[in-house]
Structures are given as structure tokens and as C-alpha cells.
Image (spheres, coloured by chain):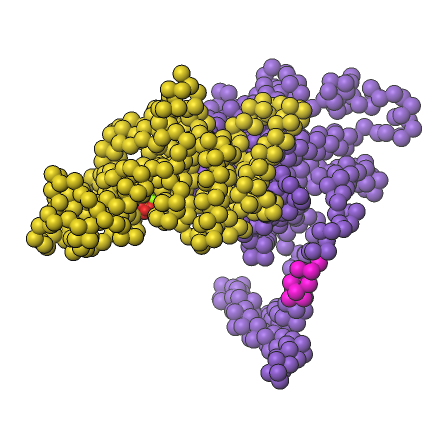
């Protein structure tokens, strides 16, 4: 039983669609995250990566599709049916946010204690026993501090434990957010661009932290990342999105040399799509046509749901601005059209 | 080099010259402003003709006062503030290491002072004289302290702006008044009942507003407060409408003795003869007042104790986390619905306790005691004290409520403003001015910083620049 369980992916996303009014942010996306591995989810800006995360962690209810989380114990959870807080509490999925969301007015230690809310709540007899100052709660509270200290040491934040979280540097805040997510005791950790805004040294420390988490706790990691160095370095498996659709899926090496990925992810211009294909040695290139997609079709570069609170953007979604997702906008689709589906592409190297 | 020394000497020597110049400007400005307001008065004489009366002396006094005030402000207050700012940083570092005895034990000292207060008043003002001081300053201020501490749980900790808090105060008061007069139940049974009833209404309010934030939340809570008040006015069969409920039973000392002179259990009849003669005790209303004082003190202390305990428990931390970032809370598996509801319920419960006490103390209640202004005052105390800080809120209640009461005592103001001046009428004006001044001086309230609920090495207060006020 346990053996077969190890084979089942920890997370499987099947036919996931998410529409905001007329905008198809994710269209029929299916992928799996193998247990105990680091899966990277990459794609250009506005590809729908954060939206996938929001569907997995229950902040959005997907329009269609099924997200199955299989815990170590073999218990299965259909995440699209659970309320958001139960996804962390019961299904053991924790996440971080693209724009850091710490409790900035609370100390670093307190941030980690809040993350252990459910365990502590049970230990405090749902407040009643804790109010009476019973010993069982005191023990639990000491344990929770020990757990927090463990993660503070891992995240190299132990010296800042009593400082307000808002006082930390950007890199330290990112690490704290990961430590906080780990304090919920997750089996799947979802990280939304953890390396964004970090300097190379901090980025290296982050890699260490993530690899350490996987090694020591066996936690599976789902990672959104723009920094290709991080992705190539630590991930076992990469899923590439463009305009809400999966365009590639495989090991880092196979994905980095996929022409569709090169065209889409690196955000080349339309002429460069052809250039990229020339580069990878494809001779099925059709005559260059002027097929620049109208800018209205794709989401803009800066559009990100986390520019405002989730609620705000959700409300905006109500206004029916129909943006037809046209295949013309997709670089990957262009590549597909130009190379033809018949010939398997034999790419030479990445254009990274 | 020379430029630097030049500026420093100028700064050091010139405050008086600069102050004199500024004072002159202020005098001119106030002369222009007040010339028609104060200098000239139009009245009618016997034959109804309009005549102008001049008050040059008063005008001169006002202008001189303004100039003097400006002079003192520029010459002394500003340099003093600057000096204090410059000195503050090093002082704070020294302070943290060896805190003085008073600082370390400030809470115990405060409680001891509060306990001794009636005794002190008794010994200075006598039995009858003490009534006013214990009642108007002690009991009145402590009721507001307790209310503000209760509201603090909702607004200060959980960050949910509640403009209708007085509704729970009303629920508590009416619960005691109705059940006490109809069924003759004792205060000690009805006190928890009133608390539970108010908590129940807290949850009733909580449900519809769970999804609201900010201005929307504020408006709905405000409306809730008004609904409760209107129900109290219009549901005449039960609440007796605007006429209110009178003859609310007094509180007994746990059934051992009471404070009704006509009752067989009157305190002086129950106490041993020897004690009564030894202290030459005479029948007086002061005993009841002093008893009430200790009762509300105990209730307020209970509120503080529970709040301090709750902050260190997971619920309390979840409240504060909710104030800081609700979405992050949900991502950590915290059930924000329950968290908000407990905040509303527990905050309301303390409001209910205070309400029951209020009804027992007054002996008479009507809906006029539970108007929006009360909610506003309680909220103002919380904001002024510093959201989340118990000591700051207690200070704010003392300043605001005690300050209002003390205005009644300031008869010397009549000498300044004339015999017809009644200071009480200006209470609200002064209240407003005080609030504006405090908010300019300390935008996050008297105690803006936040005490951490757990620490590894040392507990360092979190500066108000990091804490959030919540989403409303
Ligand atoms: N709540 C929402 N309402 C309306 N549109 C939304 C909402 N959330 C996301 N979108 C849209 O869905 C698309 C995908 O956005 P998403 O934030 O998932 O992209 P992303 O891949 O995370 O991009 P980035 O790399 O910039 O973070 C964008 O066009 C965005 O505008
Ligand atoms: Mg994103």
C-alpha cells in the first residue's frame, strides 16, 4: 500500500480551467507533481502560473477541472472542493505569495507561531484550557517554539527572531515566508517566485534552503520561478505554461531545448520566433508572415492578480470584458504551426 | 567650516528674536481676526436701534494672549521638543538595560493605587464628600476603561472596525434590567447571563459582516447599533420604550448583605455592632458607591487579565494576524470565520458585562444611554490610547472621561470667561480639540507600539511603523 502510494503523484491537476469573465487564464491544463520532487512551473508573465497556485490553494474556485492531492497516508483530497484554510489544515498544502505577505507588525517568531495555529488551538483546548493556564498547553507552546527555532535556524534568521517581520530585508522576508509555510507541516509546498528580487548570494542560499527542505522533510515542492538558474539548478521536473496552456513538460534539460519553450518563455518577438527556429536547426520554416498579435489579445506584461488584494481582482472579473484568447497570440502555437506537427524537433541548444 | 559654525550659533542664539517676530505676526493676525468677533458687538438699545459696543480691553487681552502664546511656543516649547528628540535615542538604550523599580512594577503600582483610591478619598473628603469623587471619577472612568478594553479586542487586535459597540452595552444593560425586575434574579446570576446574551448578539452581528471590510464593515456595524436602539425604543411591551425601565434592583454583596437602608440585610445591620461603633459608621449611600467601585475595578481587571491571556493563546495571535493580513492567515490554515466571530463574541461579552453593571448602578435605563455618540466615544478612547494597548487605552479613558468630569469642577473658568460660562457645555468641544491635538502629536495613540506575545531572547516592543490597523 505504502509502496504503491509512493508511486502516485502527490498532486495531479486534470483539465483545469479558470476563466475570468471572458479571459481564459488557464485552459484545460493537466500536469502532475511527483512525490518528493521539486516541480517547477514556468512561463512568461501573465501565463497563469499564479492563477494555478490560487486554484490549488483554494483562493480561486476553478471553472472546470479536478485537483487531487494524495497525502503520504494515502488519503485523497479534491482541492477544488475544500475551503481555502482546510487545504492547508487538512490536505497539508502550504504556499507563499508572489508579493510577500508576512504579518509585518508581529515578530519573526510570532509569524512562525501563527503558522502553528491549528496544532496549538487543539492543545489549548480551543482556548478554554489555555485560558486556565493548564500545563498541557504550556508544553505544546514550548514545542511550538522549538519547531519555530528549528526553522529559524534553517532559514538563517535565528538572530532576528525578536525583530518585527516588517523590519527584515527583502531576501530575509522571502526566507521567513518559506519558514512560516513549513511550520504548518505541509506535504506539498507551493512557492510563488521565491527568488524574485534576490541578489545572487541570497538566491544561492535559497537553493540550499529548498534542497534542504526536500532532503530533510521529504516535502514535495511546486515552484514558480522566472530565474532560470534556480529552475535548472534545483528542479527535477518542469511544466511550462503559455497563455494558460501547457506547452511543455519534462526534465529541465528537455524543456530548456524545446523550441516552443524557447520561443514562448524567452518572450522573443515574432521575427525572433523564426530566428529561434533557425537557431535550433529547423528547416520547415515557412515564409515569414506578418502575424504580430494585436496587443489586446494577450494579457499585458504587468498584469498580475497580486497587484491588488485577491477580492478586488475577483470582483473585477465580474465585469464581462471578453478577451478572446486567440492562438495567434501564442508564440508556442506559432512555432507549432510553422514546424508542423509531423517532424519531431531536434534542437541544438538553449538560447538562455 | 565657518558656514557650519555660523548656522549653529544662529540656531543657539536666535530663538528669542525669531519668537518675538513670530509673536508680532500672530498678534497682527489675531487682531485682524478678532477685531469684528470680539472688538465690536452690535446690540439694540431701548428704541430698537442698532448700536455698536466696543470691547477694546478684551480684544487687547486676547491679542496679547495669542502673541504671548506664540512667543512661548517658539522660544521654549520647540527647542525643548528638539532637545528631547535629540536625547531620546541614547536614553532608550540605557533604559532597556536597567529599568527602574517603578518602571518594572508599574502595573502592580497602578493596581495598588486604584485599590487605595477610595480609601484615600474617604480620608480626605469624608463619607458624603467622597461620593462624587468615587462615583464620577472612579466608577464612571472604569466603566469606559472596561468598554474600551472590550472594544479593543475587536478593533485593536482583530482590526475589525466596529461602530456599533454600544449595542452590546445596551443588550447587557437590558438583559439585567428586564430579567432583574421581572424575575427578581440576582445580579450575580444575571451578570454572566448578560455577557452570554451580548456574546450571542456579537455572533449575530458577526455573521453578516464576515465578508465585509473597511468602510462597509463600519457602516453595517453602525446600522446594527442603531437597529438595537430603535428596537429598544419601539418594542414597548417589553422594553417600555423611551420611558425606560426603572427600579432595577441594586447589587447585593453576594447575598450576604445589601445596601438598602430599609432592608433587614442592610450592611450596617449585618456588620457586627462593635465594628459599627468603632468606626462610628452612619448610614450613607457612599458604601454602595465604594462597593460599586471595587466591583467595576474587578470587572475591568478581569477584562484586562483575559485579554492579556488571550493574546498569548493561538486565538489572540490569530486575531492580530488577521489584522495584519487576512489572506496570509487563510494560507496558514486559520479558519478566519471562526476567528472573526470569536473576536466579535468576546468583545461583545465584555460590553455585556459592563452593560449589566451600568444598569445596576443607575437603577434606571432608557435607550438614550445607548446612542451612537457612546460608540464614538468608546472608539475614540481605543484609537487615542493606541489600538491594542491596554495601558494606553486606560490612560485615554482617564484623560477623556475624567477630563470631561473635571471640567465641571473648574469653576475658576468662570472668572476668566464671565459668570455665565458653564464649562460642562464645552465638554464636547474640548474633547474634540484634545483628540485633534493628541492625533497630531501621536498619530498612533498614546502607546503606539506593540508588545510581542512571545520572544526568544528579549521582548522588544514592535514600533507602530510596522503594525497595521486592519482592513476596517
Ligand atoms: N482575479 C482575476 N481577475 C481577472 N483576471 C485575472 C485575475 N487573476 C489573474 N487574472 C489574469 O489571468 C492571467 C494570468 O495571471 P497570473 O497572475 O496567473 O500570471 P502569472 O503567470 O503569475 O504572471 P507573473 O509571472 O506576472 O506573475 C493574467 O492575464 C491576469 O490578468
Ligand atoms: Mg504570478
Segment colored magenta? B82-91
| Residue B194 rendering spot, x and y as whole percentages | 58, 23
Q: Residue B123's x, y, as percent?
A: 84, 40
Furthest residue in direction left, as rendered: A287
Q: Residue A341: x and y, percent?
A: 13, 39
Give the left or right position of residue B396, taking residue A22 as reference.
right
Residue that sits furthest to the bottom in the current view: B2
Q: Is residue B102 above or below residue B38?
A: above
* Magenta-drawn stretch, dominant element (helix, strand or loop): helix
**Rendering quadrant holding ligand 1:** top left
Q: Residue lying furthest top in this view?
A: B183
Position of A167 relative to B52 (above/below): above
Give the image location of residue A88, x and y in percent.
44, 30
* Residue B311 visible in image: no
Q: Nearer the viewer, residue B162 or B178?
A: B162
What residue appears at the point 68 percent right and 48 percent down from the top-left corner?
A: B406
Q: Relative to A302, does residue A114 appear above or below in the rendering?
A: above
- Residue under the point 21% across and 46% down: A347
**Image quarter of the N terminus of chain B:** bottom right
Which residue is drawn at the image coordinates 42% and 45% (left, top)?
Answer: A194
Q: Is residue A45 visible?
A: yes
Task: Check residue B85 for magenta coloring.
Answer: yes
The number of numbered discs placed on residues in the rendered structure image is 0
Image chain in purple: B
Q: Is residue A269 above or below residue B127?
A: below
User: What color is chain A drawn in?
Assistant: yellow
The reply to whether the magenta stretch includes residue A76 is no
| Residue A249, quarter of picture | top left
Q: Nearer the viewer, residue A48 or B415?
A: A48
Q: Nearer the viewer, residue A136 or A203?
A: A203
Q: Residue at x 55, y 70 (%)?
A: B30
Amino acid at each position: 500500500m505504502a509502496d504503491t502510494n509512493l508511486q502516485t503523484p502527490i498532486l495531479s491537476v486534470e483539465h483545469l480551467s479558470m476563466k475570468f469573465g471572458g479571459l481564459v487564464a488557464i485552459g484545460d491544463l493537466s500536469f502532475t507533481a511527483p512525490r518528493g520532487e521539486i516541480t517547477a512551473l514556468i512561463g512568461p508573465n501573465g501565463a497563469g502560473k499564479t492563477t494555478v497556485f490560487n486554484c490549488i490553494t483554494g483562493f480561486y474556485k476553478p471553472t472546470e477541472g479536478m485537483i487531487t492531492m494524495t497525502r503520504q497516508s494515502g488519503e485523497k483530497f479534491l482541492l477544488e472542493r475544500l475551503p481555502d484554510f482546510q487545504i492547508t489544515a487538512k490536505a497539508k498544502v502550504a504556499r507563499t505569495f508572489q508579493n510577500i505577505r508576512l504579518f509585518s507588525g508581529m515578530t519573526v517568531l510570532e509569524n512562525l507561531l501563527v503558522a502553528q495555529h491549528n496544532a496549538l488551538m487543539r492543545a489549548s483546548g480551543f482556548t478554554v484550557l489555555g485560558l486556565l493556564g493548564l500545563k498541557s498547553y504550556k508544553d505544546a507552546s514550548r514545542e511550538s517554539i522549538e519547531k519555530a527555532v528549528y526553522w529559524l535556524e534553517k532559514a538563517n534568521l535565528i538572530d532576528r527572531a525578536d525583530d518585527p517581520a516588517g523590519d527584515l530585508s527583502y531576501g530575509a522576508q522571502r526566507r521567513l515566508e518559506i519558514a512560516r509555510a513549513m511550520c504548518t507541516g505541509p506535504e506539498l509546498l507551493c512557492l510563488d517566485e521565491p527568488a524574485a528580487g534576490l541578489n545572487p548570494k541570497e538566491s544561492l542560499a535559497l537553493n540550499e534552503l529548498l534542497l534542504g527542505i526536500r532532503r530533510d522533510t521529504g516535502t514535495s515542492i511546486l515552484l514558480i520561478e522566472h530565474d532560470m538558474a534556480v529552475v535548472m539548478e534545483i528542479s527535477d521536473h518542469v511544466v511550462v505554461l503559455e497563455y494558460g496552456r501547457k506547452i511543455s513538460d519534462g526534465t529541465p534539460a528537455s524543456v530548456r531545448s524545446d523550441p516552443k519553450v524557447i520561443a514562448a518563455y524567452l518572450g522573443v518577438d515574432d521575427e525572433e520566433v523564426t530566428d529561434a527556429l533557425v537557431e535550433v536547426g529547423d528547416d520547415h520554416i515557412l515564409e515569414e508572415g506578418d502575424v504580430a498579435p494585436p496587443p489586446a489579445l494577450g494579457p499585458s506584461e504587468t498584469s498580475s492578480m497580486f497587484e491588488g488584494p485577491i477580492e478586488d481582482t475577483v470582483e473585477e472579473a465580474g465585469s464581462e470584458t471578453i478577451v478572446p484568447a486567440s492562438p495567434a497570440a501564442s508564440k508556442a502555437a506559432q512555432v507549432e504551426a510553422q514546424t508542423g506537427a509531423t517532424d519531431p524537433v531536434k534542437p541544438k541548444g538553449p538560447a538562455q | 567650516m565657518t558656514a557650519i559654525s555660523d548656522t549653529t550659533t544662529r540656531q543657539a542664539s536666535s530663538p528669542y528674536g525669531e519668537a518675538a517676530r513670530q509673536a508680532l505676526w500672530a498678534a497682527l493676525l489675531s487682531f485682524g481676526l478678532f477685531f469684528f468677533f470680539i472688538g465690536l458687538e452690535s446690540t439694540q438699545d431701548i428704541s430698537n436701534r442698532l448700536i455698536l459696543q466696543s470691547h477694546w480691553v478684551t480684544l487687547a487681552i486676547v491679542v496679547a494672549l495669542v502673541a504671548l502664546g506664540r512667543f512661548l511656543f517658539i522660544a521654549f516649547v520647540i527647542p525643548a521638543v528638539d532637545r528631547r528628540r535629540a536625547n531620546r535615542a541614547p536614553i532608550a538604550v540605557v533604559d532597556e538595560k536597567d529599568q527602574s523599580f517603578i518602571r518594572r512594577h508599574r502595573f502592580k503600582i497602578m493596581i495598588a493605587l486604584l485599590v487605595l483610591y477610595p480609601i484615600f478619598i474617604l480620608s480626605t473628603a469624608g463619607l458624603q464628600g467622597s461620593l462624587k469623587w468615587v462615583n464620577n471619577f472612579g466608577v464612571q472612568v472604569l466603566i469606559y476603561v472596561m468598554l474600551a478594553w472590550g472594544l479593543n479586542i475587536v478593533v485593536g487586535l482583530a482590526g475589525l472596525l466596529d461602530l456599533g459597540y454600544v449595542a452590546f452595552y445596551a443588550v447587557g444593560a437590558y438583559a439585567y434590567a428586564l430579567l432583574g425586575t421581572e424575575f427578581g434574579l440576582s445580579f450575580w446570576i444575571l451578570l454572566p447571563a448578560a455577557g452570554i446574551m451580548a456574546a450571542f448578539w456579537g455572533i449575530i452581528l458577526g455573521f453578516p459582516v464576515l465578508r465585509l471590510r473597511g468602510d462597509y464593515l463600519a457602516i453595517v456595524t453602525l446600522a446594527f447599533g442603531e437597529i438595537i436602539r430603535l428596537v429598544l425604543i419601539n418594542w414597548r411591551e417589553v422594553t417600555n420604550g423611551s420611558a425606560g425601565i426603572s427600579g432595577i434592583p441594586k447589587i447585593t454583596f453576594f447575598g450576604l448583605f445589601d445596601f438598602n437602608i430599609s432592608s433587614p440585610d442592610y450592611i450596617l445591620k449585618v456588620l457586627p455592632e462593635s465594628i459599627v461603633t468603632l468606626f462610628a459608621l452612619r448610614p450613607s449611600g457612599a458604601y454602595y458607591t465604594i462597593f460599586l467601585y471595587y466591583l467595576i475595578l474587578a470587572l475591568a481587571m478581569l477584562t484586562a487579565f483575559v485579554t492579556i491571556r488571550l493574546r498569548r493563546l493561538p486565538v489572540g495571535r490569530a486575531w492580530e494576524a488577521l489584522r495584519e493580513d487576512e489572506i496570509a492567515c487563510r494560507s496558514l490554515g486559520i479558519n478566519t470565520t471562526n476567528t472573526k466571530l470569536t473576536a466579535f463574541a468576546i468583545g461583545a461579552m465584555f460590553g455585556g458585562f459592563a452593560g449589566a453593571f451600568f444598569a445596576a448602578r443607575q437603577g434606571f435605563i432608557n435607550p438614550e444611554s445607548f446612542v451612537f455618540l457612546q460608540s464614538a466615544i468608546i472608539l475614540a478612547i481605543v484609537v487615542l490610547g493606541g489600538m491594542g494597548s491596554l495601558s494606553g487605552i486606560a490612560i485615554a479613558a482617564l484623560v477623556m472621561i475624567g477630563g470631561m468630569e473635571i471640567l465641571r469642577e473648574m469653576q475658576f473658568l468662570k472668572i476668566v470667561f464671565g459668570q455665565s460660562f458653564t464649562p460642562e457645555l464645552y465638554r464636547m468641544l474640548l474633547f474634540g480639540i484634545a483628540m485633534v491635538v493628541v492625533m497630531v502629536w501621536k498619530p498612533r495613540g498614546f502607546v503606539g507600539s506593540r508588545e510581542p506575545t512571545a520572544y526568544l531572547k528579549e521582548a522588544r516592543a514592535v514600533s507602530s511603523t510596522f503594525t497595521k490597523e486592519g482592513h476596517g
